Amino acid sequence: MKYSKAIIGERIKKERKLKGWKQQDLLISLSRSEDARKTVTNWENGKTLPPLDDLLAMCGMFECELGYLLGEFPEHTREASDLCAATGLSEQAARSIIAIRDDSERIQSNRQNKSPEDATLWTATSLDLLNSLLENDRFFRAKHYDEQGNELSTGLLNAIFTAAFHSSGLGCPIRLGMTFDELVETDRHMQKALAAAGLVSVSSKNAALIYLQKANDELWAIIEEFAKEQRKKELPVKATITFTFDSSDANHKASALEADESAGDP
């Protein structure tokens, strides 16, 4: 693979600025004399390459892999780069998913050093719950049809999206495959029809709260199903899950769920 001095310099400059460092700050961190500031300028302008020792030191400072500074991949780690490319997620979102996985692996590792009774506290990990959500069709959509036979999106994720549209003032029902322009036009027709019928249209704010509550109910139902599955596994499981939705206009709360039951209980 051919490496570009210009790209390497751009990455160093970008990360230095993100940390709010001046060139002399980077030099101090590299245990170099401030008189060597021209050296950093040459690096960042793509005129010369930093020694390997300095590159490795910068990887630690910038919390990245060497391949990122060398321009081999666009995000700070190859793993995050691959996840972003495959899903379209931002690097921060990808890092969050990786952190959930790493945290779950740490918990599973700790289970091996605990007594069987203590180990049951870690049966349901964050990764287990995330997988349960993503594998559940209702997380994305539960198929529902209107009177004309159009398929409507009513799943957890779509309820959240609809709430976002209402919050932005669009306030229109979402049908699978609708374009943004169709969303706007549908909302206009809906508002006109309500006005012609002498009905008062629901405000965007209240509509958003309604869809947030739908999302809350759907999430809670999926979590309850997940909890039931966990209770069937191994030894007794104790899990505490809290999800709260609260606002000045609508006060809906899903209180803490506490389960401490033996395996095989219904």
Image (cartoon, grey):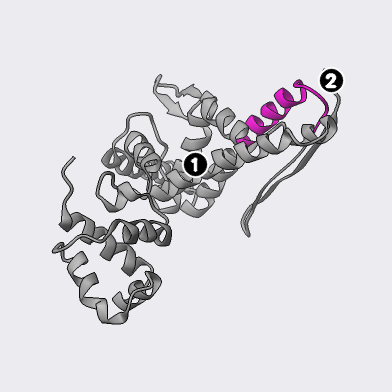
Q: Is residue 71 left or right of residue 262?
A: left
Could one spot residue 218 in this view of the protein?
no
The reply to whether discs 2 and 1 touch (Cβ–Cβ < 8 Å) is no
Which residue is most to the left? 47
Which of the two residues, 183 or 200, is positioned nearer the viewer here? 183
Q: Is residue 143 above or below residue 167?
A: above
| Residue 122 in view here | yes
Q: Is residue 201 above or below residue 49?
A: above
The magenta segment is 217-238
Task: Tell me residue 7's x, y (percent).
Answer: 19, 55
Q: Earlier in the sequence, mark 2 or mark 1?
A: 1
Residue 80: image x %, image y %?
Answer: 39, 42
| Of the pair 185 and 196, the residue shown nearer to us | 185
Residue type at mark 2: give it: Asp
The tag on residue 265 is: 2
Residue type highlighted by circle 1: Ile
Q: Which mark is residue 98?
A: 1
Residue 216 on image: x %, y %: 61, 41
Neighbourhood count class around disc 2 (C-alpha, 10 Å): few under 14, some 14–19, many 20 upward: few
Mark in the foreground, 2 or 1? 1
Q: Is residue 243 magenta?
A: no
Q: Position of residue 254 (x, y in %)?
A: 71, 44
Q: At 67% across and 34% down in the image, what residue appears?
A: 108
228 left or right, relative to 266 = left
Local secondary structure at mark 2? loop
Can you say which quadrant of the picture contains the C terminus? top right
| Magenta-colored segment: predominant secondary structure | helix
From mark 2 to mark 1, how far is it between C-alphas?
34 Å
